[in-house]
Image (cartoon, grey):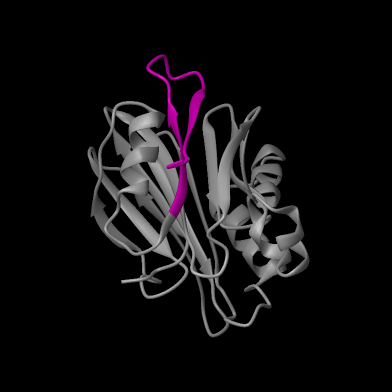
Amino acid sequence: MYVGRIVVVGRSDGRPFVAYRVSSRSFPNRRAEIRGKSILVSPLNPADLARNPYIAYNCIRVSGDVAVVANGTQADMIAEKIGDGQRPLDAIGLSLVAYGYERDELDTPRIAGVVRGDRAWLGIARREAFRVEEFGLVQDRALMVATYEKVDFSPLSFSGEGAEEIAKAAFGLSFERPVCAAAAQMNRQGTDFGLAVYNPD
């Protein structure tokens, strides 16, 4: 099954995490790169941006006890709104409403997630629907949403000790055409998120 981009929020090894996977048919030549407190997805060939401006963005942003994950530039807006004091539910909702779905040939939905402590939030903006929800995190369980097919908030068995293992697990999810993956997990001291990427090459 091809589901496109995947956002995952969950709890593993007693710590909250977010994960992201790029799956792509049209632009498979992309990689994930850590840049400070963010993870950037971008094409290997910058000329691809002229064909589709939506293929380069921060997929993960972390700040203190909050990690944001998304399939587009809404990640930055969500992180900034939470930094300004908004609740994660409101920050996701306002950002997804502001951006809406992507105006590409597939009307690709925008998806996003946030974790903070023992709570998580997921949101999706589709052409025909909009949804944001809050969840309690459960050990070794996660929730995912994808741009195609898996557009509901689906439970998932998911575990890993550290962001590196979580990124690899996200890449290994049993959906077609994986390209790269990224993750952030709270450290054992509960003071900050560790970041990791997985690029198969």
Q: Identify the residue at image location x=62%, y=36%.
A: 38
User: What's the magenta region?
Assistant: 179-201
Instruction: Point out residue 171 in the picture as x, y percentages from the top left corner.
Output: 37, 48
In the image, taking residue 58 as reference, residue 196 lies left or right, namely left
Instruction: Point out residue 65 in the picture as x, y percentages from the top left corner.
Output: 52, 29
Q: Identify the residue at image location x=66%, y=27%.
A: 36
Residue 61 in view in this figure: no
Is 151 in the magenta?
no
Q: Nearer the viewer, residue 146 or 81?
A: 146
Q: Nearer the viewer, residue 92 or 49?
A: 49
Residue 168 in view in this figure: yes
Q: Nearer the viewer, residue 19 or 164?
A: 164
Instruction: Point out residue 165 in the picture as x, y percentages from the top left corner.
Output: 33, 32
Q: Nearer the viewer, residue 127 or 22?
A: 22
In this view, 26 is above or below 113? below
Secondary structure that dominates the magenta span: strand
Q: Identify the residue at image location x=26%, y=58%.
A: 174
In this view, 172 is above or below 15? below
Instruction: Point out residue 84 in the picture as x, y percentages from the top left corner.
Output: 72, 40
